[in-house]
Image (spheres, rainbow, N blue to C red):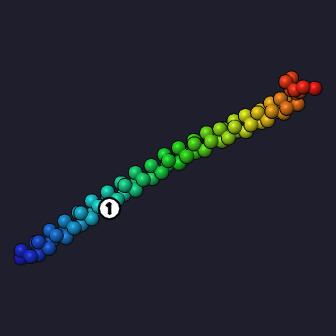
């Protein structure tokens, strides 16, 4: 074996090692991304549930205000002259 074949072997092993390192980092990043996506989906589901509760409460409040408005309008005004 001469010197150039040793360097070629070292370069090939170095390239293979670096490729394995980069693939490992890539898989780790994808795993982190999937975990983050799952957590984000949970948060979105919770926000959707809260938004539905707020929407229902607002509808109930609007109905109450409409009922109160109708009651107030149906009563005669005491400040009016007859």
Q: 60 or 4, which is in the foreground? A: 60
User: Does residue 13 appear left or right of residue 40 in this picture?
Assistant: left
- Estimate the x, y position of residue 71 in percent, counting from the top left: 85, 29
Q: Looking at the rendering, in which quadrant would you find the C terminus? A: top right
Q: Residue at x 69, y 35 (%)?
A: 57
User: Does residue 56 appear left or right of residue 7 in this picture?
Assistant: right
| Label 1 Cα crowd, 10 Å radius (few <14 / some 14-19 / many 20+) | few
Q: Is residue 23 visible?
A: yes
Residue 73, quarter of the rendered image:
top right
Q: Is residue 60 visible?
A: no
Q: Residue at x 11, y 72 (%)?
A: 7
Position of 11 relative to 59 (above/below): below
Position of 63 relative to 37 (above/below): above
- Estimate the x, y position of residue 80 in percent, counting from the top left: 87, 26
Q: Looking at the rendering, in which quadrant would you find the N terminus? A: bottom left
What element does badge 1 sit on? Answer: helix
Q: Residue at x 32, y 57 (%)?
A: 25
Q: 79 or 71, which is in the foreground? A: 79
Residue situated furthest left in the rendering = 2
- Estimate the x, y position of residue 62 in percent, counting from the top left: 74, 37
Q: Which residue is mark 1?
A: 23
User: Does residue 20 appear left or right of residue 41 in this picture?
Assistant: left
Q: 15 or 80, which is in the foreground? A: 80
- Estimate the x, y position of residue 8 in percent, counting from the top left: 14, 73
Q: Residue at x 65, y 38 (%)?
A: 54
Q: 67 or 36, which is in the foreground? A: 67
Residue 6, quarter of the rendered image:
bottom left
């Amino acid at each position: 074996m001469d010197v150039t074949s040793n360097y070629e072997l070292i370069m090939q092993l170095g390239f293979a090692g670096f490729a394995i390192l980069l693939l490992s980092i890539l898989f780790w990043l994808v795993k982190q991304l999937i975990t983050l996506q799952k957590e984000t989906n949970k948060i979105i589901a919770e926000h959707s549930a809260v938004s539905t509760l707020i929407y229902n409460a607002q509808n109930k409040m609007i109905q109450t205000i409409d009922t109160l408005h109708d009651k107030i309008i149906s009563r005669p005004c005491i400040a009016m002259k007859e």
